[in-house]
Image (cartoon, grey):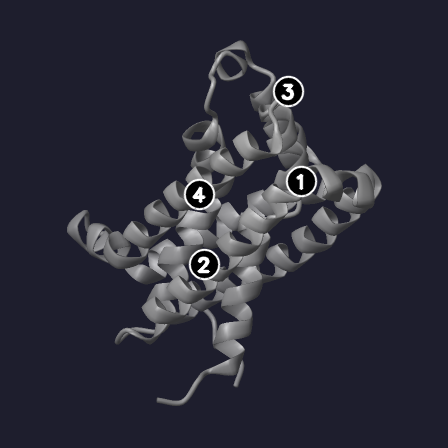
Amino acid sequence: MMIDTAYMITAFVTMLVVIDPIAIVPIFLALTPGMNAKQRARIALRAVLVAGLLLALFAFFGKAVLGFIGISMPAFRVAGGILLFLTAMDMLFERRTKRREDSSETPEIIEQDDPSVFPIAIPLVAGPGAIASVILLVGEKPGGEGLVTILGITALLLLIMYIFLRLSSRLERALGKVAINVITRVLGMLLAALSVQFVLDGLAEYGFVTPLS
């Protein structure tokens, strides 16, 4: 089976942007105040495993669920593209980061001893954007190729996120808020372009637009 390089690059960039392992670092620190490295490592591992399990479930059964409730893949591509575009706008104008910071400051979350499942795994890592992306990307390559590719890419990115969370204190000092904001904006622009492509692909399947050769 030939490897579709263009598909792999698109899938990797899409999942990288929506999971956003770098931008989660300061939020992780805000959710784990006063904890030592061992405690943070345990929370980071649990959060990554829970998020990975949730995304894998949607990769396997997301299309079947859509079919059960009567939603076609082209329709989901258009809806998912719009959702990802809104996420990109949030990233470009810092609304996403501010919303994450606000959620980390609510009394309900601060009172929790273990924020690994909520809000880190859900919805900060495996949020609507990541779930929509998994279903869309798996649907782009039927026959198992898309599933294997997306599961591999997701596992790789979650491993990278785990490493970043383990090194969160050092990364925050090394990068600083300015660098994190710049990276978030660049990723937001990439996600905006990819989301438009999802919408165009969905419309092309309905015959509204002609795909470029």
Q: Which residue is mark 1?
A: 168
Per the model, the C-alpha gap separating discs 1 and 4 is 19 Å
Residue position marked by numbered label 3 in the rendering: 34
Residue 146 to residue 66: above or below: below
Among numbered discs 1 and 2, the one appearing first in the sequence: 2
Place of residue 57 in the rendered image (x, y in percent of width and height, measured from the top left): 28, 51
Q: Are marks 3 and 1 in contact (CB under 8 Å)?
A: no
In depth, the one of 152 and 191 nearer the eye is 152
Instruction: Look at 42% across and 70% down and name the residue there.
Output: 204
When the figure is inspected, residue 149 is found, relative to residue 199, above or below; the finding is: below
Looking at the image, residue 57 sits to the left or right of residue 166; the answer is left
Residue at the image position 53 percent from the left and 79 percent from the top? 6
Q: Position of residue 164 (x, y in %)?
A: 62, 47
Amino acid type assigned to the residue bearing label 3 in the image = Gly
Q: Amino acid at mark 4?
A: Ala
In the rendered image, residue 184, in percent from the top left (x then y), is placed at: 70, 47
Q: Three-letter amino acid code at disc 2?
A: Thr
40 shown above or below 125? above
Label 1 secondary element: helix
Residue on which disc 4 sits? 126
